[in-house]
Amino acid sequence: MAGEESRFIREAFESNYIAPLGPQVDAFEREFIKKSGIRHALAVVSGTAAIHLALRNLEIGLGDEVFTSTLTFIGSVTPIIFQGGTPVFIDSDPTSWNMDPDLLSEELEACRRRGRLPKAVVPTDLYGQCADLERILKVCQPFGIPVVVDAAEALGAKYQRNNRNQKNRSVDSGLGTGEDEYSWVHAGVGAKAAVFSFNGNKIITTSGGGMLASDDEAFIEQARFLSQQARDPAPHYEHSQIGYNYRMSNIVAAIGLGQLQVLDVNGKAIGNHSWQFKRDPLGSKNNFISPQDKPVAGRAKRAQSRRHPTYAGGSGLAPVDHSGSFFRPRQAL
Ligand SMILES: Cc1ncc(COP(=O)(O)O)c(C=O)c1O
């Protein structure tokens, strides 16, 4: 803990909002929006719940395919199954360890030929390393497929994207205003929605919790409705849809408010640790392909290109064969 959390918790007690709503929840969402640059946010009980709400909003239903990352945590996959969908795994780019945009593109083309596209793509920003979101969005856009970024581990991480490709340049939209070709934007910016986790092992923690963020206000408001038991606007209890009890508690949000104050400090500390951790576990640098040269902007920097020069140039790092069974295994879990 950073120090200010107990003050925010005390304020929550004093306001008597000991409930899954209240001023600390509202303030946590507002502060989160400022930090992330994503316009709207909904605080919920977990990152898994946030992904579930996003997929429910996208009307993922029985038998629908959702593309997701091979290298991820189960919490980004189970919500697909909650909805009756089928997860389809797209293998990783050796540079970022995240979803490979080239394999995604190949597979979407194959789906088009088969006449059956996935209903959504859920790439993970693993260990705080952003996926190449700009390319993933570009690949999905002609197919009209929404992208929900599982940025559960990537709060505070940034990726670089090309300003020339952006229509709406403003500080508010996180795109930067300058004439520079590239600018750094927060993990998840530009996607249909992004999901963050505040579990105990994350960059900041609320003991448990999550955030669903999107530039689409209606998307967040629909998720808010579903997260509060989908209660219809009537004086009595009336429910015409199935909802969930997913809202974050005011006490938990108070912890989050204190933690957001040290996001940058935590991000840098964990970034350094993460780098060490990734290089050494097999006892040899050459056995482990690191997703980043050195930690930048918290735990992450953008995957620089499709193929990292050290990888392409044969530095002794093991090449990854995408032709085998790791590519898009189709069996459901
Ligand atoms: C990549 C990833 N996705 C999803 C989740 C699920 O988040 P939560 O534990 O808050 O449900 C986590 C973390 O636990 C995660 O690391």
Image (cartoon, rainbow, N blue to C red):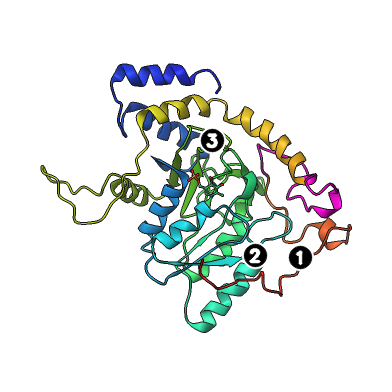
Query: Could you tell me the amino acid type at mark 3?
Result: Gly
Residue 220 percent location from the top left of the image: 36, 48
What residue is disc 1 on?
Answer: 320
What residue is disc 2 on?
Answer: 91
Count of marks overlaid on the render: 3
**Does the segment drawn in magenta span residue 324?**
no
Q: Earlier in the sequence, mark 3 or mark 1?
A: 3
Residue drawn 62% across and 50% down? Answer: 126
Find numbered disc 1 in the image and state the secondary structure of the residue it sits on: loop
Q: Callout 2 environment at 10 Å: few (<14), some (14 to 19), or many (20+)?
A: many
Front tag of 3 and 1 = 3
What residue is disc 3 on?
Answer: 200
Front tag of 3 and 2 = 3
- Dots 3 and 2: beta carbons under 8 Å? no
The numbered mark at residue 79 is: none
Q: Callout 1 environment at 10 Å: few (<14), some (14 to 19), or many (20+)?
A: few
Q: Main secondary structure of the magenta part?
A: loop
Residue drawn 63% across and 44% down? Answer: 128
Please give left or right for residue 121 compared with residue 224 in the image.
Answer: right
Residue 120 percent location from the top left of the image: 47, 64
**Does the segment drawn in magenta span residue 290?**
yes
- The residue stretch that appears in magenta: 279-300
Residue drawn 61% across and 61% down? Answer: 70
Find numbered disc 3 in the image and state the secondary structure of the residue it sits on: loop
Residue 41 percent location from the top left of the image: 41, 41
